[in-house]
Amino acid sequence: MKKSDNTIKYVCIGLGVVVAILLLAIAFLLGQQSKTNKPDGAGRSSSGSVTLAGETAAATQPQVTEATSDQPQAPTESGSSAAPQSDDAQMPFTVLPPAGVTENIPKELDVEMTSGSLTFEIGAQFDVQYDSSVIRVETVGGAMTIENDHSNPTAGERKRMDVTVVVPEGYAFEDVDIEFGAGKLITRALRTGTLELEMGAGSATLEGLVATTSAEIRNGAGAFTIKSGSLNNLTMQCGAGATQVKAALTGSSRVVAAVGAVDIQLEGSESDYTVAFQMGLGACYYNNEKIARGGSFGSGPNRVDLSGGLGVMRVTVG
């Protein structure tokens, strides 16, 4: 009987141990379940990565901030602004000038072009317009340079080398220097203190041309026309072609023509000018009267000297 009592005792102890173990296991499982039911941010993120105290979730999720006027918008993965681009933001057909060009008008302008066309227009604000990768525009201080990117453009590039300079009405540069290989030059608003203009070949039509200090013009071959303006101390050399000038010439001016026809209409009256001719071969006309190959007319304060090799030189006053 004593042995059976011991057996029953050991069985009861074993059952008690098993029950205790089961109770401990159940308590542990309930504790783990309560931890997993806690909300995100209490020591563990929703993605399962541990976050330290004070650390943001930027490593796992992009941080969204509101863009202000003083802070640029964050770029997207494609590199563009997060804000959608409107149709107005697209690049216009005309290439925009460098920064600052539309805000500050240069005092000096230097143009060096091998070919193409150059046009001066009147507009509300100063601007340079072009649509060719071979045109380069640079501004340093108060001086602007417009030139070809290289000296030997292809035929396709040459057709697109058109530059338009927009100048506010009444604005005058201090100095303008234009060197043109071959092409077309048109001015409807060009005022400057000093002017240097050289054209190898092509055509030029200049209207409203004003140079208050001096003007030096050299034309190799082609049609050269000044339709209106006022030039002080003009020096003009014409190689071959037809040259027409209708302007007021002040100071001391000299016109030299190698071969071709020169027709000058002086604004003002005969008392304003002293006109002197010197011709090699050809004919001279003063106020529609044919004269000898040399001679001087008038005694005005503004002197105009004309000399030619072969051709016709004609001067009309008034």
Image (cartoon, helix red, strand yellow):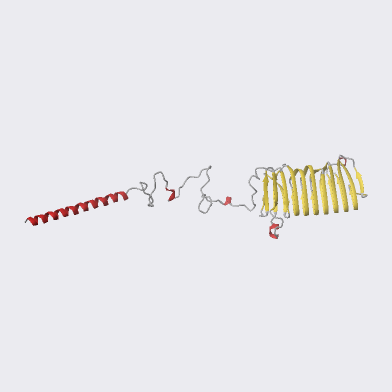
Horizontal placement of 43 versus 313: left or right? left
Q: Quadrant of residue 169?
A: top right
Question: Is the C terminus in the top left, top right, bottom left or bottom right quadrant?
Answer: top right
Question: Is the N terminus in the top left, top right, bottom left or bottom right quadrant?
Answer: bottom left
Q: Can you name the residue that lies furthest to the bottom here?
A: 155
The count of marks equals 0
Q: Can you name the residue that lies furthest to the right here?
A: 292
Residue 257 point in image, percent of width and height: 85, 51
Residue 277 point in image, percent of width and height: 90, 47
Residue 215 point in image, percent of width and height: 79, 45
Q: Residue at x 73, y 51 (%)?
A: 112
Q: Is 192 located above or below residue 149 in the figure?
A: above
Q: Can you name the residue that lies furthest to the left here?
A: 1
Horizontal placement of 153 versus 30: left or right? right
Q: Residue at x 92, y 46 (%)?
A: 295
Horizontal placement of 113 versus 35: left or right? right
Residue 124 point in image, percent of width and height: 67, 44
Horizontal placement of 216 versus 104: left or right? right
Residue nearest the observer in this picture, 296 or 256: 256
